[in-house]
Image (spheres, grey):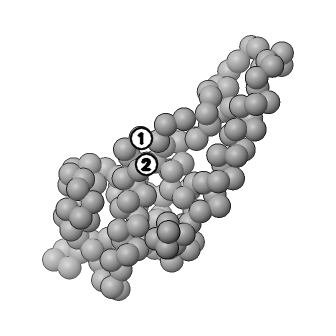
């Protein structure tokens, strides 16, 4: 499993919104500039986060974005899954992964265990945890 720039930047954008929250909406250009991510790529990531219900948005002169909930209410695993999809280390652990050898595979339980550890870890951390670290 390798987390793409989309997942990594989504976490950075969410942390940026949390740490710069002054009760007002934050302009995309300000977020993109602080995070050194292009406006175009930031827009794509914010669209995904917005569709997931993670953001509040406003248009116009004072428009922009802010978190829909408190940082402590966002699990890192949820943010990564919304941007990356399933975080399984191998395809046969996903709904689309079809493996004829699954029943006789000597490594399947190992991959299941690794998937469980990954899931437990990313779900144990919140945005608030990342901000405090």
Q: Position of residue 131 (x, y in %)?
A: 46, 71
> Seen in the image, is 102 located left or right of residue 45?
right
Q: Which of the pair 48/41 is nearer the observer?
A: 41
Q: Would you say the residues marked 2 and 1 are in contact, meaning their CB atoms lie under 8 Å apart?
A: yes
Classify mark 1: helix, strand or loop: loop
Q: Where residue 67 appears, x then y in whole percent?
A: 42, 72
Category of crowding for the residue at label 1, using alpha-carbon neighbours closer than 10 angstroms: few (below 14), some (14–19), many (at least 20):
few
Q: Please give the name of the residue rendered at 56% of the width and 66% of the height, measured from the top-left corner.
A: 126
Q: Nearer the viewer, residue 108 or 99?
A: 108
For the N terminus, the quadrant is: top right
Q: Is residue 5 above or below residue 74?
A: above
Which disc, if any, is residue 4? 1
Q: Secondary structure at mark 2?
A: helix
Residue lying furthest left: 61
Q: Residue at x 70, y 18 (%)?
A: 99
Asked if one can make out residue 46 in the rendered structure from this viewpoint, the answer is: yes
Task: Name the residue at the right extreme.
Answer: 104
Q: Count neighbours of disc 2 (C-alpha within 10 A) and say few if under 14, some if 14 to 19, many if 20 or more.
A: many
Q: Is residue 79 above or below residue 24?
A: above
Using residue 36 as the reference point, say whether residue 66 is left or right of it.
right
For label 2, the residue is 7
Vertical side of 54 occupied by 122: above or below: above
Residue 87 sits in quarter:
top right
Which residue is rendered at x = 20% and y = 62% of the image?
Answer: 33
Residue 57 visible in the current orientation: no
Quarter where residue 60 is shown? bottom left
Closest to the observer: 92 or 118? 118
Percent position (x, y) of residue 129?
Answer: 54, 69
Q: Which residue is drawn at the image coordinates 41% and 41% (left, top)?
A: 4
């Amino acid at each position: 499993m390798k987390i793409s720039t989309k997942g990594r930047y989504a976490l950075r954008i969410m942390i940026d919104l949390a740490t710069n929250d002054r009760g007002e909406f934050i302009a995309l250009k300000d977020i993109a500039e602080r995070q050194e991510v292009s406006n175009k790529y930031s827009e794509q990531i914010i669209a995904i986060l917005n569709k997931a219900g993670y953001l509040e948005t406003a248009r116009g002169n004072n428009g922009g974005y802010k978190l829909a909930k408190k940082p402590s209410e966002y699990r890192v695993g949820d943010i990564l899954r919304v941007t990356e999809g399933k975080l399984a280390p191998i395809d046969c652990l996903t709904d689309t992964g079809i493996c004829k050898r699954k029943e006789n595979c000597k490594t399947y339980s190992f991959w299941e265990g690794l998937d469980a550890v990954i899931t437990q870890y990313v779900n144990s951390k919140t945005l608030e945890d990342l901000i405090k670290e």
